[in-house]
Image (cartoon, grey):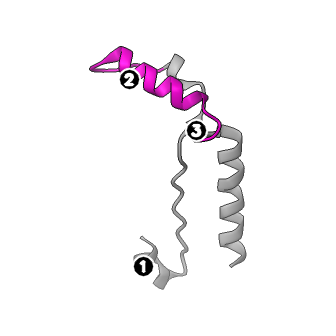
Amino acid sequence: MHAELAKYGIRVTTVCPWLMRTGSPRNAEFKGRHELEYLWFSLSDSLPVVSFSAETAARRIIEAAAMAIRN
């Protein structure tokens, strides 16, 4: 998209956050191997070393967008 829209003066920033701690495993519906999928999501949702809080992810996304605007 960036290359296609640049000629119109439109900038594109892609945001790909890593794992986020949102509390969603408690509200998610799992298909297939329910127990294993819930376990994986629960563990990843609770590990601050490999996941971000939703607030941290939102702050970093806003900072990246602001930086893209300034450049």
Query: Which residue corresponds to mark 1?
Result: 3
Image quarter where the N terminus lies is bottom left
Please name the amino acid that badge 3 sits on: Met
According to the picture, the residue beneath numbered tag 2 turns out to be 37
Residue 36: horizontal and vertical position, in percent?
37, 20
Q: Residue at x 47, y 27 (%)?
A: 41
| 28 or 21, nearer to the observer | 21
Q: Amino acid at mark 1?
A: Ala
Q: In the depicted view, which residue is nearer to us: 67 or 7?
A: 67
Task: Say which of marks 2 and 1 sits in front.
Answer: 2
Q: Is residue 47 above or below residue 27?
A: below
In this view, the residue in front, 10 or 26, is 26
| SS at mark 3 in the image | strand
Which sits earlier in the primary sequence, circle 2 or circle 3?
Answer: 3
The residue identified by callout 3 is 20
Residue range corresponding to the magenta coloring: 28-49
Query: How many residues crowd mark 3 within 10 Å: few (<14), some (14–19), many (20+)?
Result: many
Label 1 crowd (10 A; few <14 / some 14-19 / many >=20): few
Q: Is residue 17 magenta?
A: no
Q: Is residue 42 magenta?
A: yes
